[in-house]
Structure formats: structure tokens, C-alpha cells
Amino acid sequence: MPLSIYQLSIPTFLRGLAIAGEYCRKASAFCIERGISPSTLIDARLAPDMLTFAGQIQRISDTSKRPTARLAAIDPPRYEDIERTFPELQIRIDKTSDFLRSINPPQLDCAPSRIIESKLPSGGVEHLPAEIYLLTRALPNFYFHLVTAHDILRHMGVSIGKRDYLYLPGEISN
């Protein structure tokens, strides 16, 4: 039985959002343990032209809810990018997760027959079949922001590694 658009998107995005939530929890604990201001991590970035940690979490939210809404042919919720604390970032993650959970498989059943319009960095537009859009644009973009959030925290000294990226707490034992 082939995988459905629902199976390829919703569980994948929810898992990544849960990992992003763990990153926020670990970053907050790191700040408390080290006695540093949370803004030190929230405003950290890998390079001057890249988004901050907060910006990466906001894009993780956007790059999961917007593509899924496109695939379901519905409007995504709009969130202002105003989060400045770890609890606010977690609320954003939770709202995004709730939105994704509100989408059921039948809403995505018709997705394979849809052509998704995607804007290119050059300003042009491409039209892709839903599966191609999900696999070559939406998921790679989502994972780019998830791994960049990981890398920012790692660069700032937070004790996270490959296991934190691949597994949620309780999924593996040492």
C-alpha cells in the first residue's frame, strides 16, 4: 500500500514540532543552569544573514502549517512573529500542532490530484504536483529550519546532539 500525503506530512510535521519543543525546553533549562538571559539563545543566529533561534522556530511553524494547508486546499492560520520567550515559542509550536491535528486524512485524499503553486526565490512561480511539492520543497524547507535551530543551540553550548534531532524523549534508552 503506497504512503498517502497525510502519512507523509502530518505525522512528520508533528514529530518535528515536538522536537522543536524539546529544543525550547532544553534551551530554557540551559539558560537557568548557566544563569544567562534567555534572549542570549533566543536571539542567537549562525550567521548575520540568517534568522535567530526564535526566527527558526517561527519558520518551523510556518513551513509545516502553510504547506499542509495548501495540500488540504484550506487557509492556514496566521501567526504574527512576536515570540520573544521560550514559553511564547512553545505556545506557537502548540498552536501549530493543534492546527495540524485538526486536518484529517480525507482532507488530504484529493491532494495527489492537485497542482501546488510555489513561489521561487527569483520571484517566479512554479506549479508542482502535490507529491513533488511535499517531497522536494515543503519537507526539505521544514527540515532546514529544524536543523538550523538545532545547530544554533549546539553552537551556543547547549548539550544536544544527533539523538536529540532523531528521537523524542522516551523513544530510546541508553
Image (tube, rainbow, N blue to C red):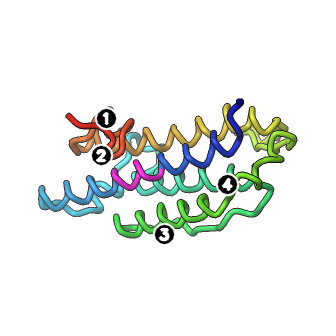
Residue 100 point in image, percent of width and height:
60, 58
Which residue lies most toward the front here? 1
What's the residue type where badge 2 is placed? Gly
Residue 8 point in image, percent of width and height:
63, 39
Residue drawn at 52 percent across, 39 percent down: 143
Residue 42 point in image, percent of width and height:
34, 57
Report the residue marked by disc 3.
82
When the figure is inspected, residue 119 is found, relative to residue 107, above or below; the finding is above
Please tell me whether mark 2 or mark 3 is closer to you in this view.
2
Task: State left or right for residue 110 relative to residue 27.
Answer: right
- What's drawn in magenta, residue-wise? 17-22
When the figure is inspected, residue 141 is found, relative to residue 41, above or below; the finding is above
Sequence-wise first label, 4 or 2: 4
Mark 2 crowd level (few <14, some 14–19, many ≥20, 10 Å Cα)? few
The C terminus, quarter of image: top left
Report the residue marked by disc 1.
163
Report the residue marked by disc 2.
170
Report the residue marked by disc 4.
66
